[in-house]
Image (cartoon, rainbow, N blue to C red):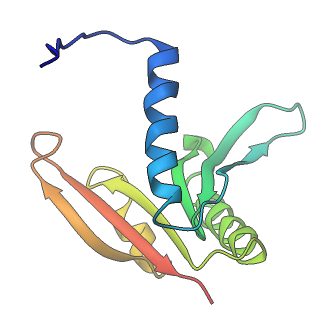
Amino acid sequence: MTRLTLHTGYQEEETCFIKYQLIKHNKGKVAYTEEEKINLILKDDEKNILGGLVGHIDWECFFVDILWVDESLRGLGKGQELIREAEELAITKGCRFIRLETFSFQAPEFYKRLGFKEMGKLEDFPKGYTHYYMYKELN
């Protein structure tokens, strides 16, 4: 029997190999789509970044990875504008869902007002807060 050893640390080529193996397995189970990365960026007249949404599309779902709006623009509807833009883009790309994660110290109520539903939560992570997993069905 081959002896297995555990190696720690990060090597990009090892990460790529493992990701490729998982994708190969997944292709045998579900129709495979290539992930599409999406950035929606808010800039002022001087091209300074004042907000943005970073995400990706895969398996008919738009994943919001990061949503950030500068303090100076909060409460002015810019976050809502970014989410609406992401939803419109997702629909044109054939997505059925949009999903994201947020924390209790961030914006779960903001997302609920925009029609997102909670599909799970992890209490006391990070300590003293809640980690929310949310989604919205797109028409």
Residue shown at 45%/24% (left/top)? 15
Q: Residue furthest bottom?
A: 139
Quadrant containing the N terminus is: top left
In the image, taking residue 98 as reference, residue 122 lies left or right, namely: left
Relative to 102, residue 4 above or below: above
Relative to 59, residue 10 above or below: above
* Percent position of residue 90, x then y: 69, 70
Q: How many marks?
A: 0
Quadrant containing the C terminus is: bottom right
* Percent position of residue 26, x then y: 46, 56
Residue shown at 52%/16% (left/top)? 13
Front in this rendered view, residue 46 or 35: 35
* Percent position of residue 100, x then y: 44, 60
In the image, taking residue 4 as reference, residue 41 lies left or right, namely: right
Front in this rendered view, residue 103 or 19: 19
Residue shown at 88%/31% (left/top)? 46
